[in-house]
Amino acid sequence: MWLGIRRFTVIPTMTENRLVIEFLNYLNHERHFSPHTAKCYGADLTQFCAYLSRDATSGERPPAAEPPKSGLGSDSAYGVVPQSASTLTTVAVKIDLTQRLLAVTAEDVKSLLGFLGEQNYSKSTIARKLATLRSFYRFCVRRNYVPANPLASIRMPKQEKRLPKFLNVAEVNRLLQTPDGSTLLGARDRAMLEVMYSTGIRVSELVALDVDDIDFTAQLVRVRGKGKKQRNTPIGPTALGTINMYLETRRADARSASFDQQALFVNKHGQRLSTRSVRRKLDKYLSIAGLDPAISPHTLRHSFATHMLDKGADLRSVQELLGHQSISTTQIYTHLTAEKMKASYDEAHPRS
């Protein structure tokens, strides 16, 4: 949250603001963003509305210029402002939230940046929230709700380069061998881990897989990625073998007739598995295998890309396999391989 409960609370929720709702519908239906991504955008905008409500009611800075007229009508929110720094006593003041959103200026955004800096938010978090606002106001410009994007002149904070974590080959092998393949859930979990490492797909793409998406003959998987874009990605025979074993065990289960027949990976109740469940299962096997508990499902994706490049795969191929829209996103893995190469040089060269 941008602002803690000890500072103020805003009611009602963002879903009662029609401008924000229209933007989120645009992300879902026109841009085909995933529900998770749209939810994150919505959370950032809710927090921004809270910040605007505080500014409009607390008198901490001069009010914005006369808001522009629009065909959106108006919405109201109640900003709750603290009476003193030491208590939670509050007072509700009604403001016109939609018009306040449309009246935002570059100075408002700079004021927000100052506030976030004072609250010690990381550069990456600030950058993400600014990206949400930039996208929101770009949408408002397209719909002619505002004449210009107030974030056009705002520079994104320079972020520290952080290399993604990845497992080495021995660690991956230890993890993949951990599930007990003799049980239905163990066979499922082994197949899930094998598929993630063999294909490099995202966990959201993993749980969206259907049985019909697996082409055992061509050794391909049909993947539905971000923006509902589909791609076919190769899958290795080992992973295909674990999928086949899992499906055979599943069909032999007495409850199989009641399972979701379309979904590839289902939970113990026979319904499509969730991303949260995948994370919980991974945590369990990390503990059993004695691996770093900070590893996430995305770490297997990082490991896939790093190992592919280590073995000589070209960057463009890895980009296609990962489903990255821009090759610059894939290039971070070249830093990983470069670091490994430098470490090998330092260890082996007599004058390093």
Image (tube, rainbow, N blue to C red):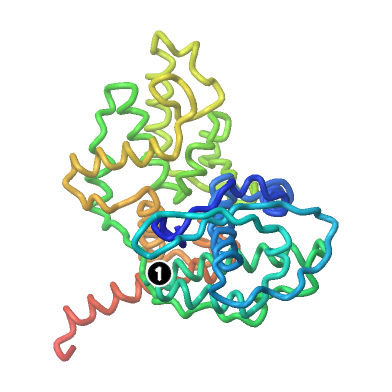
Amino acid type at circle 1 is: Tyr
Seen as rendered, the residue at the extreme left is 350
Please identify the quadrant where the N terminus is shown.
bottom left
Residue 321 coordinates in the image, percent (x, y): 52, 55
The quarter of the picture where residue 155 lies is bottom right
Secondary element at image label 1: loop
Residue 321 visible from this viewpoint: no
**Relative to 24, 197 lies left or right:** left
Residue 227 coordinates in the image, percent (x, y): 64, 51
Label 1 CA crowd tier, 10 Å (few <14, some 14–19, many 20+): some
Please identify the quadrant where the C terminus is shown.
bottom left
Between 114 and 194, the one nearer to me in the picture: 114
Residue 13 coordinates in the image, percent (x, y): 58, 46
Between 235 and 257, the one nearer to me in the picture: 257
Residue at point 47%, 57% (across, down): 8
**Relative to 54, 71 lies left or right:** right
Residue 186 coordinates in the image, percent (x, y): 30, 28
Residue 241 visible from this viewpoint: yes
Seen as rendered, the residue at the extreme top is 254
Q: How many marks?
A: 1
Residue at point 19%, 43% (across, down): 289
Q: Is residue 342 above or below residue 83?
A: below
Residue at point 50%, 60% (across, down): 81
Seen as rendered, the residue at the extreme bottom is 351
Residue at point 34%, 33% (across, down): 189
Residue wearing tag 1: 121
